[in-house]
Amino acid sequence: MENQTGSREHILTQIRTALGRSASTVAPEPLPLFVSPPALSTDTELINQFGCELEKVGGTMTRVQTVQELRKLLQSLFPADEFASVAVSNAEVLRQLGIHDWLISDDRHIVPSREEFILAGRQATEPSSRLLDNEKLADEYNRVLVEAHLGITCADYALADTGTLALVSGGEQHRLISLLPPIHVCLLDPRHIFPSLNELLAHLQVACETCRTLPQTLTCITGPSRTGDIEQTITLGVHGPRSLHVILYEP
């Protein structure tokens, strides 16, 4: 142990000598205190900041007020391929707006949520083999979802200072649908935009204390998927959607 310590000190001494530094340890100067910018107070300011930051990271934001405007916008985002499939989460808001039924009437090939997909598969099998089929159906769902061209989900919250969407695990099964299809369309309630992550975590802490249930995951999405190689070349869509469209629905 003493030999190892001596060798370590010898190596460090050689490094200090090569750098022209003395053997004495000099404490670095303390970093200046971080001063957070003042939080925005009005909903309009939060929405404008969120939209601005979202555009900086490659996303788009559109505000709609009616179901007709929402459907028209979705039509413009659908791929031109008539065989393109659309994955839709099981969000209650999407059900209330009739998005699922509208897609069916529009002859769209729909990939349902994971829960709905497995439930439909189990109903078509014998009771004795349902346990094994659950695993097979989950794998089959992942394969089908990867081939989807567009995914529609909702976001639980958003952060104005970074243009980030926050998806909390719970009732809506939206994590896979937000990650696998190349185009992610996300419906957001503008009242759920928080100034920063600090305010959101404080809100979640109060909410968790009230219901006494902690979410298993909090997925944060900041723009489309970006990947940079060693030459600092940015590529979109390698590990997730290559485009992100946020729709603020404010009836």
Image (spheres, helix red, strand yellow):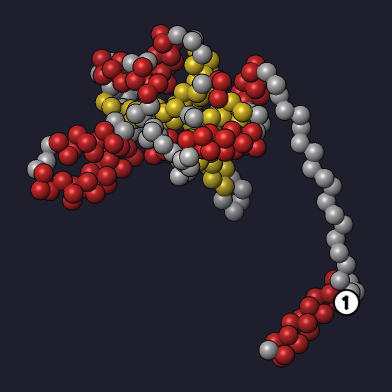
Q: How many labels, in total? A: 1
User: Which residue sits furthest bottom?
Assistant: 3
* Residue holding disc 1: 23
In this view, the residue in front, 80 or 138, is: 138
Look at 19% across and 34% down and name the residue there. 120
In percent of width and height, residue 27 lies at 86, 64
Q: Is residue 10 left or right of residue 120?
A: right
Q: Is residue 191 above or below residue 126?
A: above
Q: Is residue 219 above or below residue 132?
A: above
In percent of width and height, residue 98 lies at 33, 16
Look at 71% across and 24% down and name the residue there. 40
Look at 47% across and 35% down and name the residue there. 211
Other-residue count near label 1 (Cα within 10 Å), few / some / many at <14 / 14–19 / ≥20: few
In this view, the residue in front, 9 or 75, is: 9
Instruction: Tell me the element at label 1.
Output: loop
In percent of width and height, residue 113 lies at 31, 33
In percent of width and height, residue 246 lies at 51, 24
- Amino acid type for the residue under numbered disc 1: Ala
In this view, the residue in front, 221 or 183, is: 221
Q: In this view, does 247 lie to the left or right of 97?
A: right
In this view, the residue in front, 200 or 24, is: 200
Is residue 29 visible from the viewing direction of this image?
Answer: yes
